[in-house]
Amino acid sequence: MGAGVSVRIALDNPDRVYGLLLVRPAWLDGPMLAHRWFTTVARLMREHGPHGRDIMAASEAFRELRESSPDTADSLLRQFDAPQALELASRLEAMPIDFPIPDLAGLKSLAMRAHVIATDRDPIHPLALGRMLASALPNAAFQEVTSKSANLARHMEELRSAVAAWIGESISRNSGIINTR
């Protein structure tokens, strides 16, 4: 969930942030749109331990999620396999109802260059949210890349290419010197 955290750091320290490369934002100025998935996983972990995975996988809502976004579905199921999964449950409950940005209007104060990358078919990181973030930042570009659920290899290649291009442009704009103070 680094995109939201990065924006918050930029809001709190704009003079220390050269630019923002924001990949697949999950939430902005309110609870995560897909918070129900995280709270469901947390509840099933608490109530059923590792067997919660099977209960979730058998639900109709989860089968629909798997059809539309298999990568997201697999990611949610992997939460049950995490070391100390029960301790993870608390984070899964708290994280999606928090929000990193107090007010979208405040993003207009961020003058640094930004690039927002998003995909479709991802209910945790909605494409519309990426577009919204890019339009709220005054110097942002937006780029849609192939969804992980559609083609993981293509997604990774497009993402690597976008990141490399952004870094390369950042270095050339800064004459090869990046301020890391």
Image: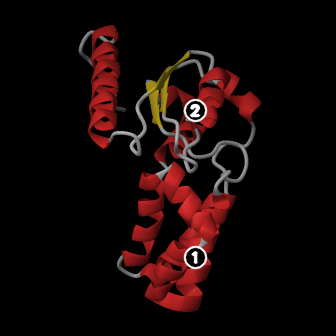
Answer above or below: position of 93 versus 2: below
Dot 2 corresponds to which residue?
130
Could you tell me which quadrant the C terminus lies in? top left
Quadrant of the rendered image containing residue 135:
top right
Q: Is residue 28 left or right of residue 163?
A: right
Viewer-proximal residue among 93 and 71 = 71
Q: Which residue lies furthest to the left in this view?
A: 176
Q: Residue furthest bottom?
A: 48
The structure residue drawn at horizontal position 50% and vertical position 58%, both measured from the top left corner, is 66
**Residue type, numbered disc 2:** Gly
* Residue 163: percent from left, percent from top: 33, 27
* Residue 126: percent from left, percent from top: 59, 41
**Residue type, numbered disc 1:** Ala
The structure residue drawn at horizontal position 59% and vertical position 73%, both measured from the top left corner, is 59
Can residue 10 be seen from the camera position used here? yes
The secondary structure type at the circle numbered 2 is helix
Q: How far apart are marks 1 and 2 (CA)?
A: 26 Å
The structure residue drawn at horizontal position 61% and vertical position 27%, both measured from the top left corner, is 131
Residue 153 numbered tag: none
Q: Which of marks 1 and 2 is nearer the N terminus?
A: 1
Dot 1 corresponds to which residue?
42
Can residue 90 be seen from the camera position used here? no
The structure residue drawn at horizontal position 65% and vertical position 60%, both measured from the top left corner, is 35
* Residue 77: percent from left, percent from top: 44, 69
Answer above or below: position of 121 versus 85: above
Viewer-proximal residue among 91 and 122 = 122
